[in-house]
Structures are given as C-alpha cells and as structure tokens.
Image (cartoon, coloured by chain):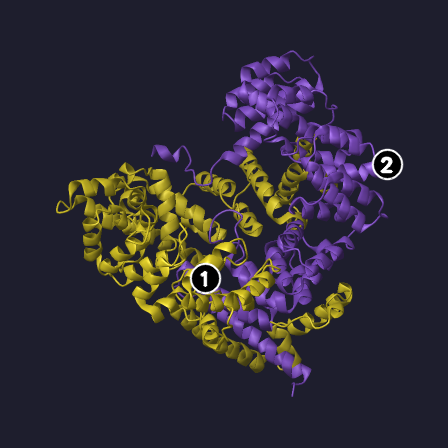
C-alpha cells in the first residue's frame, strides 16, 4: 500500500484531477469492437478477437475457480481461528520480535485506531505480534489485551486469528495450558476454536478435558459448535458423546444445513436412546427449527414443530433455489429455465407439492420473476389471462423490494392496464416500490423515473415518487409535478397535496 | 520499457474482453451461491485493476444480490476496495457514469479511500451522496484524537457551503464525547470571526448544551446576539435530544427564531424517551403554533398520552374547539396510534371520522393506506390461496 508522498499533490483541485482521471478511463474503457475498428479489418480480426477473448476468458475462469475451490486465496484475514491466511503466516515467520512486544503493540494499535476502515498491513503486524506474545507469556498477553479491549482491531480477536497456527505448533495440550493462563472470567479467544478443532478431529476425550476449563455457561454455548463441526461421516460417535454427557442439544446443529431435520427425526424415533434424552432433544429450539426447515421431514412433523404450510413453502423454495447450485443466478442468466427449476423443487417437496400445488407454483414464480420477469411469465402460460395478470400484479406489489427497478418495470410491462382492477393494482405496485426505491437510491431513482419512456408506467412512477417525496423533500416534489400528464393521477394528486 | 500507448491500450482492451468472457462463462458454472459470490468477487477485483468501468458495468448486473435481506450490502462490493484505494478520483468518476452505482457503492468507496487518503475524501465531501457523506463523518468522529485527525477536521471546517458545514459539524459533534463547559464554549465562538471554525465551535457548544438545564440555557441564550441567533438555533436543534433536560426550552427557542425548515425535519423524534409526564408534554404541545412545519413535533408530543389512554386521549381532544388545528391533527395522530401501536384499523377509521378539516382528513386517510402498504409482509401467501 503506497503512502501519500506529497500531501499537497493529494489535495490538488479535484476538478483537475477528475479531468485527468477521466482521460485515463476514456483510454482504458474502449470496448473490444472499437479496438477492432481501429484495426480497420472487421471480418476475420473481429472473429479472431472474440475467439481469443473467449479462450482467454475460459483460462481466467478456470484459475479463479481453482483458487475458490481450494480456498487457498482469501480476500480477507480469517478471524474465526479455522485457517491462517498465508500472508499472516508469512509475517509470523518473518517478523522481528521485539523484546518488549507490548510496547510495540501499543504503538501499532494507536496507529491502527486512526483508520475507520480496513488496514491490512497493520492488522497483519498486530496479529503476528499477538501470536508471538501468546507464545512468550500468555498470562501477560491476556492482561495486556484486557486493557486494550476498546481498540481497533479487537486484540483478542487478533490473537484468536492465530489459533490454527498456535494449535499446529503447540498441540492441544499447549493450547489448554494457554487457556489456563487467562485469569479473567470473560472467555478468552481460544476455547471455542479448540472445541471446534477437537470436534473436527472427533476427539471426545479432548473435548471433555477442555470442558473442565470452561464455565457451565461457556460449555452450553459451545454445544452447537461441536455439532456443526463434527464430521458428517461419523454420526454414531457424536451420538455417543451426546448421550454420555447427557447433552442432547449437541445433536441439534449436526449435519448439513437443510437436511438436519431428517437426521433428528430418525433420532427422535430411536428407542435405543433414553426417552428423556429424546424428549429434551425434541424440545430444543434449534432442533425444532431444523425439523421445520427440512423438506424431507414428513409434513406432519414439520407443522407439529411450529411450521405452517405458507411459511414452509416460502422457506423451502428459498432454500432449494440455492441447493446444489444457485438456481436463481442460473435463471437470471438463461442457464436454467423456469420449468426445470419448478420440477426440481416439486421433486424435493413432494408433500407440499401435493397439498398446496398452486401456492408452491406461485411462490416459485414470485422468486424467479425477480430475476427475469419475461422468462418467469412462461410458468403461467396455462393460466387464464386474468389469473396470469392478477398473479403478476400481486408479485409486483409484494416482491421487488431490493431489486433493480428495471426488472420491476419489465414485470409490469407483461401486464395490461385495461381494467380498473389492473390499473389500481399497477398503481399500488408503483406506490410501494417508489417508497423503498427512493429511500435507497435517492436522486438516482428520480433520474431513472424521469427517463422512462412515455406511457402509463412513467405517469404512475412520477405520481408515486411525488407522493413519496412531496412532504419531506418538497424541493424535489415541485419539479416532478410538471411531468405528470395523466388527468386521473393529477386529480388524485390534488386531493392528497 | 513501457510499451507505446496504443499497444498498451489494445492489450488492456483485450484483457478486459477476456474478463468479460470469463464473467459470462461463470454463469454456466453450477456453483452454489457462496462459491458463486467468491468467484465473482475474485474476477471483479482482477478485472477492476485493468478496466474499472467494465468491471462496474458487470457488477451492476448483479448489484441487487444480498447475502442477507433488506438494505444489506452486496458481498461483491468488496471487490472494488483495492481499485478505489489505488485510483480514488478516477474510480469516483467511473461511478458517476452510472447514477445508481454511486448510491450502491458510495459507502465502499468512502471506506476504502478514507483508509488511505482521508484528506481527499474530506475535500470531496460535498459531492458524495448523503449516506456516503454521513459515513465519512462517522469515520472521522470514530478516529482517535490525533494531530492528523485534527488536521482533517480543520480541512472539513474549510470545505463546503455554510449549510453543508452546519450539517457536517453537527453530525461530527453529535458523535464526539462531551468536551468543554457550555458557557466557556459560547464565549469562545462568540469572539471568533464568521467561518468554518466558528461553526465548528458552535457545534461544540450546542453539543455541550445537552447537559444543562432550562434556566442555564435561557441565561446563555440571552448572551447571544440577534445576528447569531438563527444559526445558533439551527446548531442547537441539531444537537439537542431526549437526554437534554432543556429539550423543550430549546425547541421553544428554535420556534421563536422561526427556523421552520429545520423544525420540519424529523425533530419530533427527539421527544421519544424524553423524561416528562405525558400529560404535561401534551399540554406543552398545545402551545405549538398551528403550522405544518411543527406537526411532527406536535404528534410526537401527544403520542404517549394517546397511547397510554386512548379513551382519555380522545376525550382530551374532543374538548378542543372543532376545526382547531391541534384537535384536527390530534385525531390524525390518534389514527396513526391506532394502527401502529394497536394494529386496529377500525379504531383508526373512528379517529378519521372525527376529523372535519379536509386536509387533515386526507393525511389520515393516506396514513391508513400507507399502513396497509407498509405492513403487508413480503412472504404472505394470498388469502385466497390458503383456502385450496
């Protein structure tokens, strides 16, 4: 990260700098076709250019996906103790450890506190020194950290970020000794991470030894960490640990999210487990939630644990749209069609699909309409026109809260405004969306509205925006009125203002 | 040796085209959402180094994805952090090419650039969208009190027009710890020449008034010249809140200075949590001038009385003369209270029926409609479907 060499240069009149910046971006931003036009050879060069770009693009994507899959390249420094970032590891090894580590840390933390946003270089320095301070004298380090607790970054968090490397070098016994050095009643940075590491390693004895170092409250808070971290391939040993410690809630967080319910439903029926243990497991809130959320659990059980079919439909559709692949994203880009997505969801929610087919279809439509309205409308081809229009308008009114306004408009354009009900429904949709879009996008939304092509949607967009801003931002409301030409909307405006 | 411009330009353009191809090819990959975001973030970050405008255009196609719900942040925003830091002015200009981009990425731009070139952000504050301005001021307020930070605050004090300065300094001092005694701060700014530093000290004084009682405020107010009272009123209004013992006195002073614009801007919310008997506050509300600008203050001042005792509250309103502004808008508040505190649209309609003023009635009817509009849940299946 370069420093500002000459502050005066950095504060040059920004108009001049903007002009310079604009020139740079004009140069860099030329689209590929403009480049080929410079070559003066449109046919073969153009094809070659596109083919080259496509091949180069595949190569770039392959490398990016490989790095994403391996998780080897992280944008951010991990602070959950699971893995150490290569940059931090390198600095731990290379840093010259001062005699008075905490005096140096004091200076670095003071420097770091000047920055409200990220400062990767300083964060790494601080973390690396916290690592060495912990190894040198954990008790002194915890004492220092306690005094620093309001600084940025949290120095205990910074220390915890080094956990995986400390665990690797010192082993579980070494970490336990460090945990014992924390003289404060508040939890230190390592207990949760150690429990997590031992759960991943399926080490029940190690876990029980760490339990002795914790308060009962800390132990209870760690139940879900054990369940979440325990390998999916070995449910039997986790069940044994949970039964041996009489902690059924350990099982509530076990397994793949979305399928935990099936696992728990089986356990609740397993008469080889103590009855009281199963009763308490069934009463556990996390377990009940898991039972409700799993589409593979019998519908009767899901509803008995607090679900209602409306909410189950909404939850299942949302979860299944990100199961195996991001189906919403695929649909948005034309890589999956609405029918195949709908059929996938039906296959995974057979009971709901059988009991509430229309509601399920409608919910899938509502989600997909936010991605690609025109393509989603194909789901409704078999419906009578008035039902199709009614559902589309309902979706425009109920959905699209944080969606590109252009897509909202695209959905409305699939619906006529011929009947009074359709006209009112359309206006209601605009009223709702202008309220939220103006809050979020401010002037840029007004600009978008004023650039809409002439027609009923432009009129309704202007009306709804005036209605939204008129009171609190009247300086904006006044110029908007002159653009409103629909006589009915003008009449309504005169009543409201 | 650096290649000639045209050759560099062709090279960068073809690399950007390659990234565009990669971006489009990503859509074909069967990734889950988390992996998709991770891959896109990586692509965008690399692409932004070569062609920021191209990368921004691609981002805007996916800008409406959130990891959570509501007005959250898109995980892809972080992809631009390095580019924003490395090329702050050029990146700001690039954001300006797409109006919505400034609003979607303004916060990220401020956070990124502030960490490296805080003076630049401060010098550009007037151009930023309001939310980004507020974020920059917050970062400044949260920074430790170092000579470098003081320099930034001085730079801020020499930026913007008078209205912006009042706004920025008020926001800054609202977030700073109380520092200084109010009468000493008043004496300090009174002696200063007009300008940014004076406005700054006025904000500090207004902040300090938060801890004085009504008598002391009145005494200090008496020492302020007529010429300065308008600005002092605005600065006071910006800082005073429900923790201030002199809140009602302060509001009376601001009303006395006829600062109607500032009074109309959500000032009523300052009464939430104000420690005073609800009947006393409601009686004070009857002294407010019958103006639209103070309607927000009025409705908040009577809200607790109406919520606590709707029947008694109605009787209290009914003893006011028909057509009286306070009565009419009192029933408007009763409409809102019925909806938001008790979710009772029938009671809201009864309140509407008691309103005789046309304009007040329209406000109440709109409130009922807006309540329906805002409280319909996104995920509710329609009533007719639930009967399948």
Q: Which residue is mark 1?
A: A141
Please identify, in this view, whether the residue under mark 2 or under mark 1 is nearer the observer.
1
Q: Residue B44 appears at what percent x and percent y? A: 53, 67
Chain rendered purple: B
Q: Residue furthest left?
A: A272
Q: Residue A306 appears at what percent x and percent y? A: 31, 37
Question: Are there few (<14), some (14-19), or many (20+) residues within 10 Å of tag 1?
Answer: many
| SS state under label 1 | helix
Task: Kindly identify the residue that appears in the image at 41 percent across and 72 percent down.
Answer: A66
Residue A481 visible to an observer of this rendering: no
Residue in front for this viewpoint, A43 or A136: A136
Identify the chain of the residue marked 1, using the numbered disc in the image: A
Q: Which residue is mark 2?
A: B225
Residue in front for this viewpoint, A457 or B337: B337
**Label for residue A391?**
none
Chain A display color = yellow
Q: CA distance from mark 2 to mark 1?
A: 56 Å
Identify the chain of the residue marked 2, using the numbered disc in the image: B
Residue B353 sits in quarter: top right
Residue in front for this viewpoint, B264 or A344: B264
Task: Kindly identify the residue that appears in the image at 53 percent across and 74 percent down.
Answer: B18
| SS state under label 2 | loop
Left or right, residue A97 beside residue B86: left
Residue A82 sits in quarter: bottom left
Residue B90 visible to an observer of this rendering: yes
Callouts 2 and 1 on one subunit: no
């Amino acid at each position: 990260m370069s420093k500002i060499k000459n502050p005066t240069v950095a504060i040059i009149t920004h108009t001049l700098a903007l002009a310079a910046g604009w020139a740079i971006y004009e140069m860099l931003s030329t689209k590929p076709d403009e480049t080929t036009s410079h070559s003066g050879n449109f046919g073969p060069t153009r094809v070659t250019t596109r083919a080259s770009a496509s091949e180069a693009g595949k190569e770039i994507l392959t490398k990016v996906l490989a790095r994403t899959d391996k998780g080897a390249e992280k944008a951010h420094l991990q602070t959950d103790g699971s893995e150490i970032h290569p940059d931090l590891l390198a600095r731990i090894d290379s840093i010259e450890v001062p005699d008075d580590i905490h005096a140096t840390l004091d200076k670095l933390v003071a420097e770091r506190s000047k920055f409200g946003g990220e400062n990767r270089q300083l964060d790494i320095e601080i973390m690396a020194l916290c690592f060495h301070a912990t190894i040198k004298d954990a008790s002194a380090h915890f004492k220092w950290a306690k005094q620093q607790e309001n600084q940025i970054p949290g120095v205990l968090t910074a220390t915890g970020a080094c956990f995986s490397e400390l665990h690797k070098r010192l082993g579980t016994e070494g970490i336990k000794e460090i945990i014992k050095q924390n003289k404060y009643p508040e939890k230190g940075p390592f207990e949760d991470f150690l429990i997590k590491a031992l759960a991943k390693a399926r080490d029940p004895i190690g876990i029980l030894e760490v339990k002795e170092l914790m308060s009962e409250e800390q132990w209870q808070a760690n139940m879900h960490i054990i369940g979440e971290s325990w390998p999916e391939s070995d449910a039997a040993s986790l069940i044994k640990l949970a039964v041996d410690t009489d902690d059924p809630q350990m099982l509530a967080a076990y397994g793949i999210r979305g399928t935990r319910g099936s696992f728990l439903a089986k356990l609740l029926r397993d008469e080889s487990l103590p009855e009281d243990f199963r009763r308490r497991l069934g009463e556990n809130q996390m377990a009940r939630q898991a039972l409700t959320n799993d589409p593979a659990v019998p519908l009767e059980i899901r509803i008995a644990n607090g679900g209602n079919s409306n909410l189950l439909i909404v939850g299942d559709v949302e979860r299944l749209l990100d199961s195996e692949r991001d189906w919403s994203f695929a649909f948005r880009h034309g890589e999956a069609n609405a029918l195949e997505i709908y059929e996938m969801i039906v296959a995974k929610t057979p009971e709901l699909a059988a009991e509430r087919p229309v509601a399920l279809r409608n919910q899938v439509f509502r989600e997909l309409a936010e991605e690609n309205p025109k393509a989603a409308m194909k789901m409704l081809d078999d419906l009578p026109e008035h039902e199709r229009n009614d559902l589309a308008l309902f979706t425009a009114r109920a959905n699209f809260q944080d969606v590109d306004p252009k897509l909202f408009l695209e959905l409305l354009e699939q619906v006529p405004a011929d009947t009074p009900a359709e006209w009112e429904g359309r206006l209601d949709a605009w009223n709702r969306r202008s309220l939220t879009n103006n809050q979020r996008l401010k002037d840029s939304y007004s600009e978008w509205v004023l650039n809409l092509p002439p027609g009923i949607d432009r009129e309704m967009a202007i009306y709804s925006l005036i209605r939204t801003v008129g009171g609190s931002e009247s300086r904006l409301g006044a110029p908007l009125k002159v653009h409103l030409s629909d006589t009915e909307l003008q009449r309504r405006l005169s009543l409201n203002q | 040796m650096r290649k000639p411009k045209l050759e560099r330009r062709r090279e960068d353009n073809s690399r950007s085209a390659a990234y565009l191809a990669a971006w489009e090819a990503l859509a074909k990959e069967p990734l889950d959402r988390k992996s998709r975001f991770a891959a896109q973030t990586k692509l965008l970050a690399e692409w932004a180094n070569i062609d920021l405008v191209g990368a921004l255009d691609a981002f805007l196609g996916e800008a409406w994805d959130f990891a959570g719900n509501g007005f959250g942040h898109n995980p892809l925003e972080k992809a631009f952090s390095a580019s924003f830091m490395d090329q702050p002015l050029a990146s700001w200009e690039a954001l300006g090419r797409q109006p919505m981009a400034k609003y979607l990425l303004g916060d990220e731009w401020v956070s990124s650039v502030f960490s490296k070139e805080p003076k630049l952000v401060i010098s550009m504050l007037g151009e930023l969208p309001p939310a980004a301005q507020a974020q920059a001021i917050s970062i400044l307020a949260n920074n430790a009190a170092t000579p470098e930070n003081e320099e930034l605050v001085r730079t801020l004090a020499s930026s913007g027009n008078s209205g912006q300065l009042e706004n920025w300094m008020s926001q800054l001092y609202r977030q700073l710890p109380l520092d200084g005694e109010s009468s000493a701060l008043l004496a300090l700014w009174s002696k200063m020449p007009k300008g940014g530093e004076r406005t700054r000290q006025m904000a500090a004084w207004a902040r300090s008034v938060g801890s004085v009682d009504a008598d002391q405020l009145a005494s200090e107010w008496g020492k302020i010249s007529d010429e300065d009272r308008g600005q002092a009123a605005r600065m006071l209004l910006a800082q005073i809140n429900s923790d201030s013992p002199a809140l009602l006195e302060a509001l009376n002073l601001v009303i006395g200075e006829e600062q109607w614009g500032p009074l109309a801007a959500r000032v009523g919310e300052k009464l939430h949590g104000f420690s005073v008997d609800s009947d006393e506050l409601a009686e004070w509300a009857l002294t407010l001038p019958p103006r639209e600008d103070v309607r927000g203050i009025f409705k908040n001042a009577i809200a607790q009385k109406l919520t606590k005792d709707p029947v008694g509250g109605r009787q209290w309103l009914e003893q006011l003369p028909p057509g009286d502004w306070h009565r009419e808008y009192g029933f408007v508040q009763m409409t809102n209270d019925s909806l938001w505190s008790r979710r009772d649209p029938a009671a809201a309609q009864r309140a509407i029926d008691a309103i005789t003023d046309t304009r007040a009635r329209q406000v109440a009817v709109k409130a009922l409609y807006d309540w329906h509009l805002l409280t319909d849940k996104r995920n509710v299946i329609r009533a007719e479907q639930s009967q399948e």
